[in-house]
Structures are given as structure tokens and as C-alpha cells.
Amino acid sequence: MLPDRPESNDAQSGQILQFSRRWRAGLRRRPAIMPDRAAEPADHLAEFEHADRNIDYGRRMLMNVIAVVIVVLLVSVGVWIADTITDMQKVQNCTLQGRQNCAPIAVPNNPGER
């Protein structure tokens, strides 16, 4: 059995397009040293250097501790909200199914106390 191929004179036959090859990333590279900057020293990095070497590490550590406390607080609040939403969803599902006594009942710790 022959595969279904359109004939060359068929109106739905496709056309093959020839694409030019692209250079691979590894073949076309810039030279390691630019010819116009070869004699120039690396002074263009001087603007990124700190002129003042007196960094207050105590303040920096305090800011890091404050950032960690804020992140821990945000994560714990997010977990608490997710837990609350889960509990509310369970009660809502119970109520929507037509069940009774869906609310949780608080039991005292000491059975002798009333």
C-alpha cells in the first residue's frame, strides 16, 4: 500500500523553502582583547570601587536580622491563613452537604471541671 502523498500537480501540494544556515554560537566569537583597548589599563572598573572602606557591619547585620524576621513573619502568617481557610472549607463543605453539627466542639482539658 502506498502512503498518502499529494501529487505534484495537485492544488494542495506544498512548497519546500530553503533556509540559510545560521552560525552556531561557538563558531562566531569576539576576540578576547579588543584591538583599540589593548593598550588601555582596566581603569573603567574604578567607578564601581568603593572609595570609603569604612563599612558599618553592625548596622548591616542588624538590617539582615530584621529582614529575616520579616520573612519568617510573612511565611508564618501565610501558613496560618492557609490553615484557617482549610478549616473553614471543611466546615462549609459539611454544611453544604446538609449535615448537622459541623462546627467543632471544644472539649475541656480536665474532665472533672464543668
Image (spheres, rainbow, N blue to C red):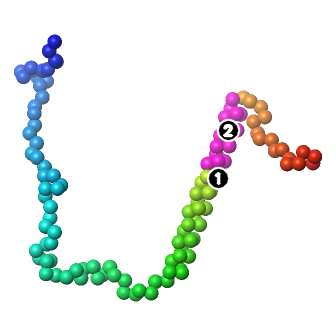
Question: On the image, numbered disc 2 is attached to which residue?
Answer: 90
Residue in view at x 56 percent, y 71 percent: 65
Magenta-highlighted residues: 82-97
Query: Quadrant location of residue 11?
Result: top left
The x and y percentages for residue 56 are 49, 83
Q: Is any part of residue 56 visible from this angle? A: yes
The x and y percentages for residue 64 are 53, 72
Query: On the rendered structure, is 56 left or right of 86?
Result: left
Of helix, strand and loop, which one carries label 1?
helix
Q: Say the numbered circle drawn on residue 17.
A: none
Of helix, strand and loop, which one carries label 2?
helix
Is 112 or 87 nearer to us in this picture?
A: 112
Question: On the image, numbered disc 1 is attached to which residue?
Answer: 80
| Residue 27 to residue 19: above or below | below
Q: What kind of secondary structure does the magenta stretch mostly adopt?
A: helix
Residue in view at x 50 percent, y 80 percent: 57
Query: On the rendered structure, is 3 left or right of 56?
Result: left
Tell me the amino acid under the disc marked 1: Trp
Is 110 or 91 nearer to us in this picture?
A: 110
| Residue 20 to residue 51: above or below | above
* Real-space CA distance between mark 1 and mark 2, rounded to the nearest whole angstrom: 16 Å
Tell me the amino acid under the disc marked 2: Lys
Examine the structure image and report whether residue 86 is included in the region drawn in magenta: yes
